[in-house]
Amino acid sequence: MKKNLFMILGLGLCLCMLAVSPALADRMGRVTPVVAVVRAVGPAVVNISSTARVRVSPFRSGDDMMDRFFREFFQPLEREQTNLGSGVIIDGKRGLIVTNSHVVDGGGDIRVQLSDRRVFKAKLLGADPSSDLAVLQITPRGSPLPQVKLGDSRSLMIGESLIAIGNPFGLQHTVTTGVVSALNRRVPTGPGEYMGGLIQTDASINPGNSGGPLLNLDGEVMGINTAIFQRAQGIGFAIPVNRVRRVMDDLLAHGKVSPTWLGLELQDLTPSLASHFGLEAPSGVVVLGVVEQSPAAKAGLKRGEVVLALDEVSLEDTADYQSRLGSVAPGQAVKLWLLEKGRRRGVTLVAERYPMERAKSFVWQRLGLELEPMDELAAQRNRVPPGKALMVSRIRSGSTAERAGLQPGDLVRRMGREPVSDLDAFYLDLVRSRHQPKVAILFQRGRAQQVITFGR
């Protein structure tokens, strides 16, 4: 009898200890900064699922040439695909959510689940595949939803502690911690394509974490998780929050992201050029030209100068310059550090939106092409549905396009990994990749397809 009484008392004591354990933990100092951040920010992290109909090839050999051969003779299959990812609420009153564009790519039905298990149907307000960002909206019911505070990614320090929250493999609200491993990382995303200016962290990021926040110990969002190396451990990447803010503002205001422009024509600084300018390492870019009436022209920049740094951070090459400019909003001041005749000087410029009236001549100079919407005859001749390609109307003599054997009437189907259908969208995508060393474009003539790489 006494033994049973002691067992009951012991069980009751254990239950009491469990009931007060959070309070005891608080008093015992176990509530670390990480715990405090997770408690504060966790409710604003959401789970996202999107369903879309996708077309896939019935044959995949792993060889691009062989796969293109199969695509010419076998119709693609259509199937339903569900994407899973994470997101974070950035405006609780309006129900605005930021996530990765690849999480909602092609998603006709997008669902958002909150930490309290409520599920909302979401509307896609805008997406920008080149920065891998998208903005969704849900309709709050009753009181405003929890939201996060956006920080300043320029303040990040290598070695600083970070917290990632997301839904890897569908495991909701998984928390991992790490540090800033590196800043301004550039990661290949496809043939001749890169995403630069990224935060590298060793906080564990797995499939499903995409779109979730990367936080500092003050609970501020420093980045949006976007990519991992599949065969690596402890290597994850996030889009800096300053770029997130700039892309989000453009998507909400215009539905698309307009490229920012300083008016510089640039070249990578090679080892021989670095030696010519008296530099020990080829870090920076050389100014080949300055466009009239551009921000650079107004600031007095000249051909032959070397741009060493942008906003106090050294530049690697032209692709790094383009990536960093992607975080700069029109009207924002930018400081460039220049090397002119052996002397270093700083110049402040005010960035502007790229003048899209220059896009047609830019395409003519870089690609050697003039394009127009595909007509019905070309669609029938090439067996391409209307609105799924652009048509070459003219070829520049001596251009890469002419040397590759392109002809008027050929179709443009894809640039990089993105399908091509709208002329203005094609101009915008090419302008945004104008500082990339190469761009790969898929052309079609009849049933034959060919990828041609164009350099700067």
Image: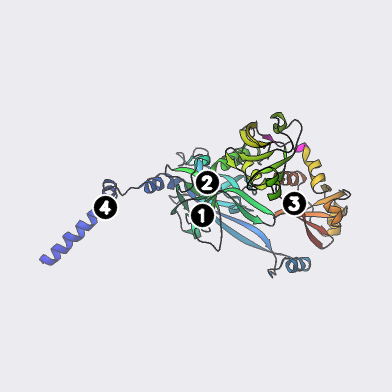
How far, Cα to Cα, is label 3 from label 2?
Answer: 30 Å
| Residue 388 showing in the rendered view | no
Across the whole image, how many numbered discs are drawn on residues?
Answer: 4
**Residue found 62% across the figure and 43% down from its top:** 324
- For disc 3, the marked residue is 420
Front of the two marks 1 and 4: 1
Type of amino acid under label 4: Ala
Place of residue 162 in the rendered image (x, y in percent of width and height, measured from the top left): 45, 48
In the image, which residues are magenta?
A: 350-357
As for residue 355 lying within the magenta part, the answer is yes
How far, Cα to Cα, is label 4 from label 3?
Answer: 60 Å
- For disc 4, the marked residue is 19
Type of amino acid under label 2: Gly
**Residue found 20% across the figure and 60% down from its top:** 11
Q: Residues within 10 Å of mark 2 (few under 14, many from 20)?
A: many
- For disc 2, the marked residue is 223
Place of residue 30 in the rendered image (x, y in percent of width and height, measured from the top left): 31, 49
> Closer to the N terminus: mark 4 or mark 3?
4
Type of amino acid under label 1: Asn
**Residue found 63% across the figure and 55% down from its top:** 188
Front of the two marks 2 and 1: 2
Along the line of sight, which residue is nearer the eye, 373 or 404?
404
Judge from the rendering whether residue 53 lies leftward or rightward of residue 17; answer left or right.
right
Place of residue 177 in the rendered image (x, y in percent of width and height, measured from the top left): 43, 53
> Closer to the N terminus: mark 3 or mark 2?
2
- For disc 1, the marked residue is 209
How far, Cα to Cα, is label 1 from label 3?
Answer: 29 Å
Front of the two marks 4 and 3: 3
Query: In the rendered structure, are the residues bearing label 1 and label 4 in contact, judged by CB atoms less than 8 Å apart?
Result: no
